[in-house]
Image (tube, coloured by chain):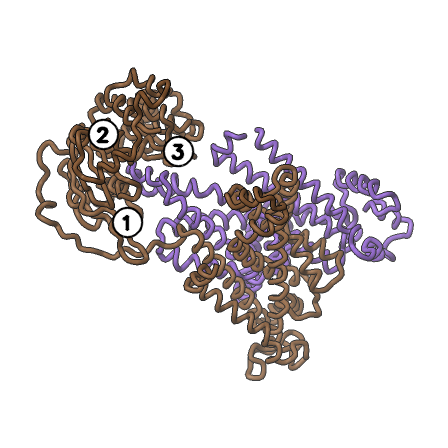
Amino acid sequence: MLDSIRRLLRHRKAAVGGSILLFFLVLALVGPWLVMDPSDLVGRPHQPPSSAHLFGTTGQGQDVLAQTVVGARETLAVGFAVGLLVTLVGALIGVTAGYLGRRVDDALSLTTNVFLVIPGLPLAIVLGAYLPSGPLRMVAVLTVAGWAWNARVFRAEALSLRNRDFVAAALVTGESRARIIARELLPNMASLLGSSFIGNTLYAVGAQVGLEFLGLGDVGSVTWGTNLYWASNDAALLTRSWWIFVPTGVCIALVGFSLTLLSSAIDELTNPALKAPPAVAPITPVVTAAQAEPQAPGVLLSVRELCIDYATERGPSRVVDNVSFDIAPGEVFGLAGESGSGKSTIGFGLLRLLPPAARISQGRILFNGTDVTALDANALRAFRWSQVSMVFQSAMSALNPVLTLGEQFHDTLAAHGRASRTASYARARELLAMVGLSPELVNAWPHQLSGGMRQRVGIALALALEPKLVVMDEPTTALDVVVQKELLQRMLELKERLGFAVLFITHDLPLLLAISHRVGVLQGGKLVEVDTSERLRAGARHPYTRLLLSSFPHLSADDAAEPPPELALAANAPAPVRTALRGGHQ
Amino acid sequence: MHYLLRRLGFYLIAAWASLTLNFVIPRLAPGDPASAMFARFEGRVQPEAMEALRAAFGFTDAPLHQQYFTYLKHLLTGDLGLSYAYYPSRVSEVIGTGLVWTLGLAGCAVIISFAVGCLLGVFAAWNRGGWLDSVAAPAFAFLGAFPYFWLAMLALYLFGFGLGWFPLRHAYSHDLEPGLSFTFAADVVRHAVLPAASIVVATLGGWMLGMRNTMVATLGTDTLRLAHAKGLPPRQVMFRYAARNALLPNVTSFGMALGFVLSGSLLTEIVFSYPGTGYLLILAVRNQDYPLMQGLFLVITLAVLAANFAVDMLCLWLDPRTRAHA
């Protein structure tokens, strides 16, 4: 808690917003004692700013400066009171609904949603018109008209917290529901309560000013809203008296802006994705003799002394460190390593698909004689997919959810200058059939397919332009074992038929040893061992490779009374897959 | 279809809830506002007509549930009672013309603002840290902090009173006969420019920021990485992949913000004496014209519910996943 407040103070937006807000709070507290009585008729009406009246006079001859300063007090007091009340009411209703669930939730959610669609201002007007005048009326009306949004937000939060361990623990110890809501749930929503309070105060100030402008406030009191009400009633525009309405409006906007800054600062602190990535410092790459050497014949891809850095708050961090390897046409090259070892970064680096914070800082990637690291934007676009394509770990999230499969094949083919829509669809059908899917799926949307089917679509898409190399980044990790094996089998068959090379990336070293010709082992961004699968199986030299190999349990016939179903399946599988199953994991 | 029916059911419940609120609020209020309301008609209405008037509003000595049914029956026939401020016009007639102006003005302004705001948000996220992102976005956010009606006052002061570019009030010049002529249409547009522009300026920043943030999140997804990997042209990645996916949550929040935006635009109408429902609202408040006030509440609420339903259908059309559950 203290730490998050300290981080908030260091945030630039929060500092600016906080200072503005603090200024107005102090103004509201002490200001009224420093200026003259705002209701006194102190001069001639509609007087422009002068030394006697710095902000001029109103249409009735009152001092505009005094009215603006004094108006801050009630406006902010009502604003914060309503902000607090709306937050509490919303949190209570939302948390109750989210935590109790079922019928209570149904009833409360329906009420919340109904209040959410009923427009606030007309409701506030009807309510306000029937209640006796005064600041309490304003608080009541604004709370009734504004609680719903908050209840919805808190309900969602309570739903997600309900399933956490500490709530379950409290239930087991037999605490009452009311106590769990008050002692376990609400304290865990501190940051949400804070940001909601800011948002609700913003709403309260705006709505209050609007209602008072309509004449629904107490027109005898001095607030920012009534100032504008009188400005409009006393014909400030007609008499060209801009000074009557401009100061109050600017104050309202400054308070509103400060609250917006604070809430956006909280958003950025809790959701780092919104924050701008740290700037990447320019580096001049040094081309070493090894990098400059032309590619040897019979080599498809040469990665030479590749280094990839991520920009962080504390300077660049090297995630791929001086990695070199070659891949021959038609070869299956495996890249193994734990998560965070840099293996996926290398895969994305080959297509220069690194996120904005990452960059290739050293080294070269040569593909079929072209220097990929030196391609300009247009050449890079032409190179991607036609030469090297990629199968993502989760086609579930990689396919575009709002386009049919056919459209996603078509835009790929069209981007590389191939084919009309009719021809694209024909090719898409052919590719779908090739990976063992019904060609009719060309008109399906991604969400209509199972995980395994989507991954097959991912492979079909990767082969659309008949690339020479396919990067497969953990293509089977998200699938269950049976589907995994089928997919691998299909992939290896296609490779035999079409002759593309594969860079297969996974943490599963035994699997790699079963399907790859050669395997590289990554540790902390460094390639610690590269060798053929046979030799690695026979005896890995590097201790880390041995550790990786031993961390996967080996199934043997003695382990189970009857063979698991995937072994039965493996009887028909080609040799490498069978090996994979023996080294497989559960 | 199932989805649409469920939404329709929800809006019917919401409509019923607002009808009931409208019935309950005057009866729960402290004091006897109903009598106060009818007291305002005294002297303008014959004593025998007074009873008819009470009956028309359902304020009789009958038990509450009977009053409620009378009230619902009147509503179903479109009878909202008599306006005090516009006596002896019927509330439904008074609101009818106002609603057309409001729907025209607020509808156009809100759609323009949403479309332009989203487009700016797309460009701001795409060129992250560019001038649109670092200068224009905060500037619009600052403008969005002003009350709508205050921006309207400033616009009227500068471009109406000051420069004289635009008319000062009303929806059309009174020396023109309303009709389907080009002169009349041009006159209506000229009158609508300032109020619409102040609504657009006040709301643009919100849409822009919302779209920018969802767009930034979308840009980091595997869907976008795959689009780049496929070598698609940048325009296509930006619109067909990023913006198209980022748009969905924004359309949903567009629906939810409609009521709020409409409230703001009602206040804008007042500044321009624009003859829409907002202007009627202030007349109702100042004259304590309860029948008109309540009628306006109902009509505005129903309009917002209908607009929300339209937004739901738009979502359905935009998102195949929702369609699947439909």
**Is A528 positioned to the left or the right of B281 in the image?**
left
Tag nearer the camera, 3 or 2: 2
Q: Secondary structure at mark 3?
A: helix
Q: Amino acid at mark 2?
A: Leu
Q: State whether residue B201 is above or below residue A234.
A: above
Disc 2: CA contacts within 10 A as few (<14), some (14-19) or many (>=20): many
Q: Secondary structure at mark 2?
A: helix
User: Residue A330 occupies which quadrant of the picture?
Assistant: top left
Task: Locate the C terminus of chain A by quadrant.
Answer: top left
**Is B239 positioned to the left or the right of B326 in the image?**
left
Upstream in the sequence, badge 3 or badge 2? 3
What hue does chain A carry in this figure?
Answer: brown
Q: Amino acid at mark 3?
A: Met
Residue at label 2?
A513
Where is residue A478 shown, x and y percent of the image?
A: 37, 32
Residue at label 3?
A396
Residue at label 1?
A358
C-alpha separation, residue under disc 3 versus residue under disc 1? 25 Å
Q: Chain of mark 2?
A: A
Q: Is residue A38 visible from the viewing direction of this image?
A: yes
Disc 1: CA contacts within 10 A as few (<14), some (14-19) or many (>=20): many
Q: Amino acid at mark 1?
A: Ala
Q: Which chain is purple?
A: B
Nearer to me, A458 or A231: A458
- What residue appears at the point 61 percent right and 46 percent down from the top-left corner? A175
Nearer to me, A161 or B316: A161
Badge 1 and badge 2 in a common chain: yes
Upstream in the sequence, badge 3 or badge 1? 1
Disc 3: CA contacts within 10 A as few (<14), some (14-19) or many (>=20): many
Nearer to me, A544 or B177: A544
C-alpha separation, residue under disc 1 versus residue under disc 2? 30 Å
